[in-house]
Image: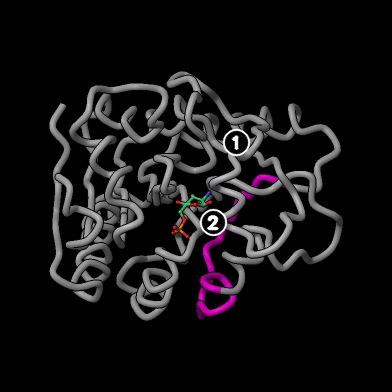
Amino acid sequence: MKPRIWRFDNANSLYYALIDEIASAVRPILDSSRSPMMALPTGNTMIPFYRLAVESEERLGIRDWTCFNLDEYHPLPSGDTPYSFRSYLEQHFYSRLIHPPRHRMELDGTAPDPKEECARYEHEIRTRGGIDLALLGIGTNGHIAFNEPGSAFDSRTRLVHLHPDTLLANFKGAPPVTSALTLGIGTLLEARKIVIVAMGKSKSQAVRSAISDPIHPSVPASALQNHPDVTWMLDQESSDRL
Ligand code: GLP
């Protein structure tokens, strides 16, 4: 299945096009008075996107969204943890909106029983009708959400150990946590639409392997080749090996 591949000369035009893409994906859902089910990523790549989304909150109908965090570190101490993905979304997105989304779902990094927490999350997704749009970034090792190389393509939401490359990319010093809860690749592939964004040279090999090389579990993002509605949004640097 051929993905759409959009390349942009500069970051600004990519993020504006991303807002347009999301606006046109959610419009028919909003028009049918249903809540768009959105899976939302973290990461540096997405910070400018959230800034723009906040400016466009009315147009995107964000107040009517149901949002699912893609992943979360585990175990987290109770209380506010600055590096948690919950804090990230609060800081960059939810707290800046005039009308935050009515339904916000997150994987609870403080949950004592990760298995039970992941089953609860899958149940929430299923009973609410499945994810309409999964917005993804990509790790330098080709991970999507926190599905590291070697993850099964039919994996569900679960506890995972993070790859040393990921820990290095996400934490400057000693990592305070080395595992996480993540939507599985199988869970992500059930989303009706997937939009994946990559920026910068450090992502170019992962982008190439994911799009142009044969599908292989060593590159989790290559699983997207099995999905019928994937849009890659890339800057020049991340796409220069395609
Ligand atoms: C993180 C997240 C991913 C994200 C990726 C890229 O660890 N788990 O969902 O897509 O790594 O992050 P960045 O945009 O900072 O490169």
Image quadrant where residue 213 sits: top left
Is residue 34 at least partly visible in the picture?
A: no
Q: Is residue 13 magenta?
A: no
Image quadrant where residue 144 sits: top left
Cα–Cα gap, marks 1 and 2:
30 Å
**Does the Cβ of the disc 2 residue fall within 8 Å of ligand 1?**
yes
Instruction: In the rendered view, tell whether residue 92 sits above or below residue 192.
Output: below
Image quadrant where residue 194 sits: top left
User: Which residue is the site of mark 1?
Assistant: 124
Q: Nearer the viewer, mark 1 or mark 2?
A: 2
Q: Which residues are magenta?
A: 92-108
68 relative to 200 in the view: left or right:
right
Upstream in the sequence, badge 1 or badge 2? 1
What type is the residue that disc 2 sits on? Answer: Ala
Callout 2 crowding tier (Cα within 10 Å): few <14, some 14–19, many ≥20: few
In the rendered structure, find residue 169 and report the number of the disc placed on it: 2
**Does the Cβ of the disc 1 residue fall within 8 Å of ligand 1?**
no
What residue is at 16 percent from the left and 54 percent from the top?
240
Instruction: In the rendered view, tell whether residue 221 sits above or below residue 140.
Output: above
What is the basis of the colouring in this image? one colour
Residue 241 image position (x, y, % from top left):
17, 47
What residue is at 39 percent from the left and 45 percent from the top?
134
Residue 87 image position (x, y, % from top left):
66, 66
Residue 111 image position (x, y, % from top left):
81, 42
Q: Is residue 107 magenta?
A: yes
What residue is at 35 percent from the left and 76 percent from the top?
52
Instruction: In the rendered view, tell whether residue 52 sits above or below residue 104.
Output: below
Residue 215 image position (x, y, % from top left):
28, 22
What type is the residue that disc 1 sits on? Answer: Glu
Q: Secondary structure beneath disc 1?
A: helix
